[in-house]
Amino acid sequence: MDLSDTNSQEKSIIEVSKGEVLVDEKAFSDERDKILEEIRSRLGTLTVEADVHDPRMDFLTDQALQMDRSDAIEILTEAMEYHADDLNFPVEVRNNVHMLLKNADAEVSSEEFDVALRVEAVLIGKFSPYPEVRTVTDPYDDPDIPIETVRAYVLGTIWVVLGCFVNAFFNWRQPKLSLASTAIQLLLYPCGMASQLLPDWGVTIRGTRISLNPGPWTTKEQMFCSLMVNVGAGSSNFMNYVLSQKLSTYYDESWVTAGYIIVGNLSVTVLGFGWAGLLRRWCVYPAKAVWPTVLPTLALNRALLLPESKTSANGWTISKYKFFWICFGGMFVYFFIPDFLFTSLSDFNWITWIAPNNFDLAVVTGSYIGLGYNPIATFDWAVINYYTPLVIPVFSTINNYIGVILGSFAVLGLYYQNAYWTAYMPINSNQLFTNYGVKFNVSKVLKDGLLDDEAYQAYSPPYISAGYLVYLGCFFMMYTMSLTYIILTEWKILKEAFVGFWRSLKDRKLMVYDHYNDPMCRLMLNYKEVPDWWYLAVFLISFALFIVTIVHYHTQTPVWSIIIIMLISFVMMVPVCIIYATTGFELRMNNLSSVIAGYMLPGNGNANLMNRLIGINTDEQADSFISDLKMAHYAKIPPRAAFRGQMWATIIQSFLTCGIIIFQIDTIPGFCTTTQKNKFVCAGTTTIYADSVILGVIGPRKFFDRLYPPLKWSFLIGFVITPPFWYLRKRFHKQMKYIHPILVTNGAAIWGQTYNLTYFTPGLYASLGFMWYIRRRYFAWWTKYNYILTSAFSAGVALSGVVVYFAFDYKTVTLSWWGNNVSTAGIDGAKSATLLPVPANGFGLTPGTY
């Protein structure tokens, strides 16, 4: 063979090979571009700067390129089964997956179909099926980012103190002003950036260098501080019980001292933390546990610290950070109007201005005494945001609103029929009344802290309003309904979690994450889990401290009753946390503890309070800690770091809230009265006190059997109606998918606590506008700005409220003019009118029969 011919052939082969490579590279590039375009379309994002690379897009694109058809089909099939009854699973995603699987079974094959199939599988199997979660998280993690640094602990502690002061101080106001963790996060950010100027001083311990300035302020340091703030910068529920026991408005107990407040608060605040760790399997690790309430904090963290590519969100290119400051500044200035300059815009009862002395008009449309049927009820973001409408899923808001409306019909029916003497009292009050329509004084029926039946018969039973009757009936229904409904709908999750818990006790080396296969859990395998016995130890120590408290002080509470309530509370905590995690609405087991304690210890108001406290605080603190753990899970914060940060923040909060409540008791005139000029009316405390009187001092037997017999059937009704509803919902899934009986009942239970439609109708508008219309029509805008908007408005209101209080209210500076007086000038503002005049000889049962 001629050598020249050989060289010519080799040259041809090389050229052909190069050509094939070029063709393959081009085909690969085209495929990548199509996948990237599909991902951007699915995420609702269009990059404006072509040279800016979004790491999340790159990651998802690479995952889609590596995924084959069979793996994609398997992921989507499992997702459809797992999310079959998931109300948060987007309808459009469900329809798309159904279509893709149907075509895959028909062996449809095209380049466009394969791209769509793989992209949907990657978004669900490698990221999250929920657009809300994808907006605020990453599908990857870097375990080497600094987290638990000295500066993070210092800054976290400072802002826990400041946030706790604001939130604990204004907790008793109606409506509350709160400095949300998102707002504190914003204020924390410049502090973190300033810490980069610290000198790099440090020490090396066991090969690890600990420095004042380990480098740039990181997203995980910011998030670690936010975890501390989220769990520690709030108020303490124990203070409701302190006020109930100490203030002359309520029980007026002299033994409630600073020592009792400090020790009791520390023990019950930490108590729920122990349960939280055990509930991780039900309420943190399952993908269904979305926890919508933590998403704004995560969204703001990304806006502050992650580099943001310039993107167009339905034509808006302003950065999230700049958008936050514009909205924050606008709301900070605006809130001076409804909070000080023109306060009638807050509770905007304009319909009653037409005829201020018309009783029926005030009862139906009034913001104070009435039911709040008013299409334009407020111009105050603190009122609009009462149920966080830009965070809670729209189906949850609508279900609750339906419940509020149905409950209002029941309230009106009871009132105008004078059922159980309700027409002799205000329609929607949480106060207790005597048979002469005046405030019930519990001290008249007590002897040494216990019920004196002779004095009780000579005085009067406690009568309750129509709103309070509906509140109690709905809450009693909700307890049995919640437990039954969750067992029927989520039994697989319950079973898997119990099996995992049992296996972890048998094998202490087994990681909790091993039982879960969602993307977030797979990423958390890089970190050491917190052993269950850590949480158990915290629980036992705090529980022992609480026992010492109730025994040492004159609470008249036997230890055995606390143990029983604790066990019942734990059983109920699982369904409560699951509902909270999936819907964003927090149910409370408060009255259940009161009823059980009332049967165990009749005639004992203090014991009823202590048992109620241990029941609800276990739930409340557990919910708070669990939501914080979910936030750490989303942010890829090591579980042990989260544990240490939470514990430290909780201890700080425990001592600080004690000092704040003592200061308020000593300095605020008219504290916890309905006429307190700065709205420190303590609505929740009054409800707790009233419940303890009727279910503790008087006792369930007298209250149910003699005063209000129908209420005792509420428990049975909740249990009986749930299985048929569950069956109908399963049988007619498409038609009844978004109807949630527990949320409807929860909405109806808002009556009788001085809240009404004024606090729900404006929030419904906001929810429909942002969580439904804008989310559907302008998804890119919603994805980029929705959580930033609600965070900015809430922060502006909270900080503006602090300025208004200490600049004007605290110094008794008042502004008296028509705009500040008109809303309280008529019957509605008086808060005490009744449908029928009280008879001269009183109303109700005759003495000796109650």
Image: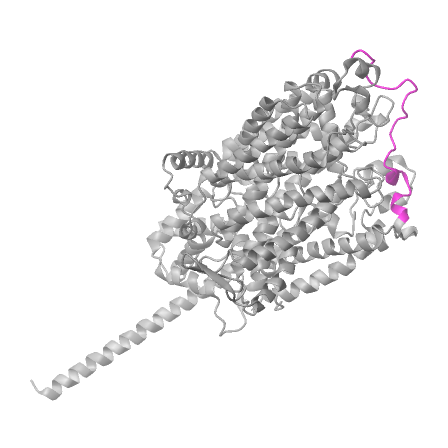
From this viewpoint, is residue 361 visible? yes
Q: Quadrant of the C terminus?
A: top right
Q: Position of residue 697 (x, y in %)?
A: 73, 21
Is the residue 717 above or below the residue 3 in the image?
above
**Which residue is drawn at the image coordinates 66% and 28% (left, top)?**
610
- Residue 846 lies in the magenta-colored region: yes
Instruction: Specify the segment rendered in magenta.
Output: 821-850
Q: Nearer the viewer, residue 213 or 643?
A: 213
**Which residue is drawn at the image coordinates 66% and 56% (left, top)?**
183
Q: Residue furthest top?
A: 848
Q: How is the image coloured?
A: one colour
The quadrant holding residue 87 is top right
- Residue 51 lies in the magenta-colored region: no
From this viewpoint, is residue 574 visible? no
Q: Nearer the viewer, residue 631 or 288?
A: 631
Q: Quadrant of the N terminus?
A: bottom left
